Amino acid sequence: MRFNSDLHTEETVREESMRQRGIERHFQRTKEARKSGLLLAQNQPLSIISAAHPKISRLIEADIEIAEQKVGHKSLAWLRDIRGISFDLLSYIVLSSCYQATTKGWTRTAAALQIGRLIEIEKEAHDRRNSSVPSKVSKDGEKMSEGEVFKSMEAAAMKKAGTNWQRKAKLKAKIEYLDFSKIAKWDVVRCKKVSVPLLNIVLENSNVFTTVVRSKKSKTEERITLTDDAHLAIKKGEAWEEWQEPMLAPMIVPPRCWECTTTGCYLDQTLASLVPLVRNGSDEQNSALEHLIRSSKEAGTGVLKNLGDSEQQLPDFLTSLNLLQKTPLKINVFVLNALSWAWAKGCDFGKFPKSSLLQESSKLSPEEFGALSKVQKSAAAEKIRSIKDRNLGIKSAQSLMEQDLTCAFELTDYDQFYLGWNMDTRGRVYPVSSFSYHRDDHIKALFLLARGKAIDAEGLKWLMIHAANVYDFEKVSNKPFVDRELWFQANKDKILEVAGDIEGTFDFWSKADKPFQFLAACDAYATFLEDGQAYLCGIPTALDGTNSGVQHYSAASKNSKDGALVNLVPSDSPQDVYQKVAELTVGNLRAILDCNSTADTAEELEKEERRKILAEKWLNFGINRKHTKRNTMCFGYNSAVSGFADQIFEDFLKPLNYSVIEGVIERHPFGDTEQEQRTAARFLAEINYSSVQETVQSAEAGMNFLKSCASALGLENKPVRWTTPSGFIVVHKYPKKIRHALKLFMYDTGLQVKKRKQATVISFSPDIDRRKSMAAVSANFVHSMDSSHLLSTILNASRPDVDGNPGMRDFFVIHDSFGSVPCETPAMYRSVREAFVEMYQDRCVFTDLLNEVQSQLKKPDRICANDIPPKGDLCISEIRNAKYCFS
């Protein structure tokens, strides 16, 4: 590991790279940085992606020259929006955005919007840089123009002497004067008109990117993907690493603290302007939060929070977010080496990304296709489409894996790094960087808490429990803690063998529920046995909630029956609500199969027979908790039968198509066509929905109340607004959509010509969509509650305990999962329960919501206290003693 005394300077270099201020400067800077030992040197040749850049730059210049000669032509509107931005920079923005589109599965429309937004930022920077408007800043007694201040700000940001805090304070003052973060956003129509001509040039001439039409339910969408040549180059490792850098990457210094909604976490202001506090937050929500933060500072409410540069009094949710950002992380090199080996070897197991494409079916001749029946033709067409869809997904996953590996290997060069964080409109917290532990197992396992601590007796117990949880043999994670420890002890020798020989023990560890997190646990245990107290363990051991939605509904209504199902009631063994729903579903399926006919007509008899056939197929397939888990989780978010059916199809029936294609199974058990499979999914969805309704009661009552609130405000054309227990303000706003049909010349990669196509761009009207507001309010309210619980837990855990011991500083959290190093798990165990009790013991969140809703209504009697679900007898304080509510 390298320790650098001037990491702030290096971070500005990294962020300037992320901003994409021109590919030539980026390459040159990276080359110089490597010479000075600042970055890992990797011997990779210039790729065809990098080679495409100068060509695209020249073609953009040529197209602009031609367009400018068309006096009065409509295209001049988009020309004005890119005037002043270099052709090199435009080329880099479009090419790098296209590469990001391939890794994230973006549609052509989404990629065009991203390109438009980046050009918008660059245009704003250009205009600021060249502004002659007087600013508030003076130099030698004379007012400086905004352009002069902006240039000074940029120059100062790239200077060395990163520890000069006085200079940084002056720089911060200049930024505040310029108010650069508050940019009037372009609308989506303007973004698309600017980006489509540039995107056309890349698709037509780069030989790197193309588009494919992908089916999604009854719709089709056009996605950007790599050409076969480009995909092969990347697979061979010929892609230059700069193209694999995500635009918003982890930071090597602590992120800037959030002090308002536009602070941003990055040091570079242009980059920070891309990171608002609230993702997709409405003007109303941002204004409300700004007012709250400003009032908190002025009134001095709450405890004084130390933010490094200054001390500010901030709302609790913002303090928690800043604490989370201060958690240093590092890469688990043991897991990274295992991941690299498995990827290079092409290992195929679990949910690990595939390294090879499926063989595409040979096309039938017209005669052969004509001889097929209608059903056979449909099945043949769907098989071809399934292979193409699958290969598109594999290509995206492969590109993303290359990007992730590049990022992970670069971060091993630092003793620690940080993630910037922000929130969604419900207050849920997310890392800003795409490379983060909010990802699949193979990426999540790469992260360690940098401030590791020695493992004591309690820590060792929690490490054992964590290892059992992530291996999860025969669902041991749903058994008492003692059983999980016994499983670990019984497999201790095998665990040590895994730590010493990843390749030789592949057949064992690859069968784990979370293979790479299990590898990390094996390595941690082996290192502890070897080094003892000298080993500072940074592996995060997680405490996961039991169906967060039902936990919050049952606590809000004090429903002890539902509370017991999700472990809010003390018990010697954990309860499993998903298993109970599965058992009820199996019973209902058997009842359908065994019931005597009550049909009066041939049509009714045929319907009964179809249901019996489907019931038998599902029973033969085997229903267990995994087939009811997602449905049960989403029930409290107002997911109905149609939503259940989509989940079942996507999670279980669609993957069976791939198993058929790959030769794992001979035939799909639910039919060869998508229509047959969706019919089977719909059938099970109806049974599951009935089972969940019968099992969980508090959720439905809570949802009805929430929908009543949304309905009452919707009648007055108002959004639902509420304040969470952590102080975050949610503005639940679903405006009606306005669809704009734009006629644009878009390059058709199949026909290789520009065609005038209709592109539908969506904007929003001032009117509230009452139906959507009612449909979404349940999910948003519950997510705001679990967010409040998480933020309160962080704040609770950070405080010194009654014995004067310092509070926790390191957090590893994902919505309803609370992680810390093993020896701090007991403290987290207490904090997560205490925060939950504090949320519900002396408060009714439904009453709080009712009061806020009535204060917003012109006619408050549209909803009243009688609409609130009745309270049960759940003892909230006893949750402190509920061992398995977060385990």
Image: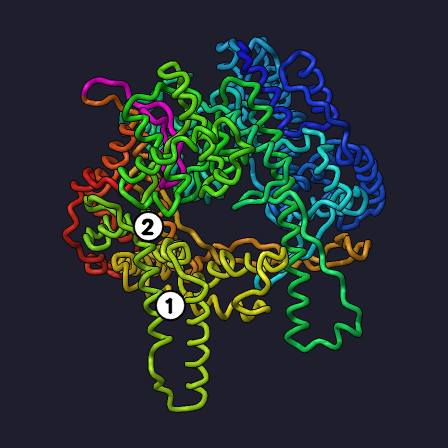
Q: Residues within 10 Å of mark 2 (few under 14, many from 20)?
A: many
**Local secondary structure at mark 1:** helix
User: In the depicted view, which residue is nearer to us: 592 or 267?
Assistant: 592
Which quarter of the rendering shows the N terminus? Answer: top right
Q: Nearer the viewer, mark 2 or mark 1?
A: 1
- Residue type at numbered disc 2: Gly
- Residue type at numbered disc 1: Ile
Q: Is residue 235 magenta?
A: no
Q: Give the colour scheme shown.
A: rainbow
Query: Measured along the vertical axis of the image, is residue 173 above or below residue 472?
Result: above
Q: Residues within 10 Å of mark 1 (few under 14, many from 20)?
A: many
The residue identified by callout 2 is 549
Q: Residue 102, position in %: x, y?
A: 65, 44
Which quarter of the rendering shows the C terminus? Answer: top left
Q: Residue shown at 80%/54% (left/top)? A: 754
Number of numbered discs = 2
Tag 1 or tag 2, which sits nearer the N-term?
A: 2
Q: Residue 571, position in %: x, y?
A: 20, 45
Q: Residue 631, position in %: x, y?
A: 40, 58
Residue 28: in sight, yes or no?
A: yes
Query: Measured along the vertical axis of the image, is residue 508 above or below residue 599?
Result: above
Is 752 situated left or right of 863 in this image?
Answer: right
Q: Residue 108, position in %: x, y?
A: 66, 50
The residue identified by callout 1 is 687
Q: Residue shown at 67%/16% (left/top)? A: 33
Query: Measured along the vertical axis of the image, is residue 193 above or below residue 372?
Result: above
User: In the depicted view, which residue is nearer to us: 584 or 224?
Assistant: 584
Location of residue 404 (image quadrant): top right
Residue 173: in sight, yes or no?
A: no
Q: Which residues are magenta?
A: 803-823
